[in-house]
Image (cartoon, rainbow, N blue to C red):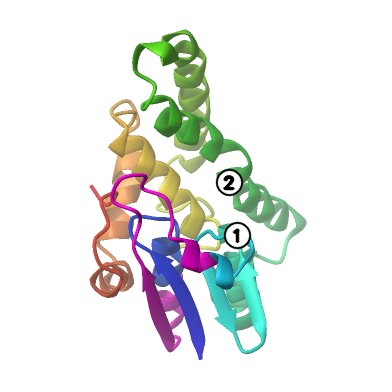
């Protein structure tokens, strides 16, 4: 059985959503952030040297990194439903957004999180950080267009990563100028599989 080493209020929540959509049996092994530092507990290092969540195990495989986990689960258990379409253009778009979520869009949001703890010392950095957040969210708003999901009428692999970008951006107060992304988040949050993942995963502050 697949095991999810699940940290509260983290990117592992989207792995639970994917597993629910796939209809796979899985076990949640919960971890709690340190109340003061908000860091993952040291026990996660026993599972993977990085000591971060999400990590899944599937038999003898130990897989870390959200993008790698989503790619593995889709290709192994749900390629026909959640994988790329047959054309080259669809495959390119699929892999672009699969890597864009963590490779580009996540960085300025993480910088927002880290600099929020610096107070006035962060002021010189904030214009550039806000500009980069706006650049990525504006790109996502335009790329989504009038489609329900980024690659069409149903969720595909990249959506399981991109939703966290939208949720985090809204949590940090960046969401107001992007109505399509707001509708996208509501569309996902209304899905029974997403709600089941929230119920099983516990406290999740980002599902605004």
Residue shown at 67% from the left, 47% from the top: 96
Between residue 196 and residue 182, name the one nearer to us. 196
**In this picture, is 185 found above or below 6?**
above
Observer-side mark, 2 or 1, equals: 1
Is residue 179 found inside the magenta-colored segment of the image?
Answer: no
**In this picture, is 2 found above or below 68?**
below
Residue shown at 34% from the left, 62% from the top: 32
Whether residue 130 can be seen here: yes
| Residue ranking furthest to the top | 124
Left or right: residue 8 compared with residue 83: left
Between residue 185 and residue 174, name the one nearer to us. 174
Is residue 23 found inside the magenta-colored segment of the image?
Answer: yes
For disc 2, the marked residue is: 102
Residue shown at 66% from the left, 81% from the top: 61
What label does residue 177 carry, if any? none
Q: In the picture, residue 57 is in which quadrant?
A: bottom right
If you read the primary sequence from the N terminus, does the residue marked by circle 2 or circle 1 appear first?
1
**In this picture, is 142 found above or below 146?**
above
Residue shown at 60% from the left, 48% from the top: 97
Badge 1 density bin: few <14, some 14–19, many ≥20, Cα 10 Å: some
Magenta stretch in the rendered image: 18-44
At which x and y percent is residue 80?
60, 77
For disc 1, the marked residue is: 65
Are circles 2 and 1 on residues that touch, CB within 8 Å? yes
Between residue 161 and residue 188, name the one nearer to us. 161
**In this picture, is 29 found above or below 34?**
below
Q: Secondary structure at mark 1?
A: loop
Left or right: residue 44 compared with residue 170: right
């Amino acid at each position: 059985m697949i095991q999810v080493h699940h940290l509260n209020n983290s990117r592992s929540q989207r792995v639970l959503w994917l597993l629910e959509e796939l209809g796979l049996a899985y076990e949640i092994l919960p971890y709690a952030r340190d109340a003061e530092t908000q860091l993952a507990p040291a026990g996660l290092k026993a599972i993977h040297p990085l000591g971060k969540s999400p990590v899944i195990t599937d038999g003898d495989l130990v897989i870390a990194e959200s993008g790698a986990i989503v790619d593995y689960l889709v290709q192994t258990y749900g390629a026909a439903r959640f994988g790329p379409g047959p054309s080259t253009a669809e495959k390119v778009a699929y892999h672009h957004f699969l890597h864009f979520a963590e490779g580009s869009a996540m960085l300025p949001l993480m910088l927002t999180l880290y600099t929020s703890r610096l107070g006035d010392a962060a002021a010189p950095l904030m214009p550039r950080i806000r500009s980069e957040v706006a650049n990525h969210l504006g790109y996502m708003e335009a790329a989504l267009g009038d489609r329900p999901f980024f690659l069409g009428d149903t969720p595909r692999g990249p959506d399981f990563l991109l939703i966290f970008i939208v949720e985090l951006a809204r949590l940090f107060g960046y969401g107001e100028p992007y109505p399509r992304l707001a509708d996208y988040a509501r569309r996902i949050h209304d899905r029974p599989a997403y709600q089941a993942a929230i119920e099983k995963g516990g406290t999740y502050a980002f599902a605004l």
